[in-house]
Image (spheres, grey):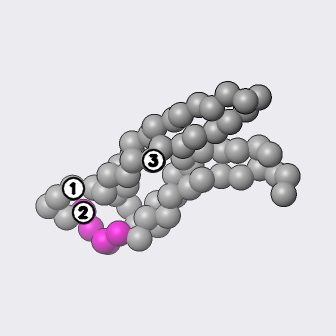
Amino acid sequence: MKGKYQIKTNYFGETELTENGPATLMVEIYTTKAGKTSRTLKTIQLGKVKENDVLAEIIW
């Protein structure tokens, strides 16, 4: 369906940071436009419960 879509995080971690530190998330996103594929690589750290970060936005 046409529309605007977001890829977001929804962290269900601990209520406190552990001795290992914040959770690290690596996301690889591939998009194709006019026959050309592009790759985006994002690495982010999540430290708060229910933290929601937008990783990508796609308009179809």
Distance from the alpha carbon under mark 2 to that under mark 3: 22 Å
Q: Characterize the local packing of mark 3: few (<14), some (14-19) or many (20 or more) Cα atoms within 10 angstroms.
A: few
Closest to the camera, between mark 2 and mark 3, is 3
Q: Characterize the local packing of mark 2: few (<14), some (14-19) or many (20 or more) Cα atoms within 10 angstroms.
A: some
Q: Look at label 1 and name its amino acid.
A: Gly
In this image, 3 relative to 55: left or right?
right
Find residue 26 and report its horizontal and vertical position in percent.
Answer: 39, 47
Helix, strand or loop under label 1: loop
Q: Look at label 2 and name its amino acid.
A: Leu
Q: Look at label 3 and name its amino acid.
A: Val
Q: Is residue 14 magenta?
A: yes
Q: Residue at x 31, y 71 (%)?
A: 14
Q: Is residue 16 magenta?
A: yes
In the rendered image, which quarter is residue 15 located in? Answer: bottom left
Quick one: label 1 or label 3, which is nearer the N terminus?
1
Distance from the alpha carbon under mark 1 to that under mark 2: 6 Å
The residue that mark 2 highlights is: 17
In this image, 60 relative to 41: left or right?
right
Find residue 51 and report its horizontal and vertical position in percent.
Answer: 46, 60
Q: Are dots 1 and 2 in contact, CB under 8 Å? A: yes
Q: Residue at x 59, y 31 (%)?
A: 38
The residue that mark 3 highlights is: 27
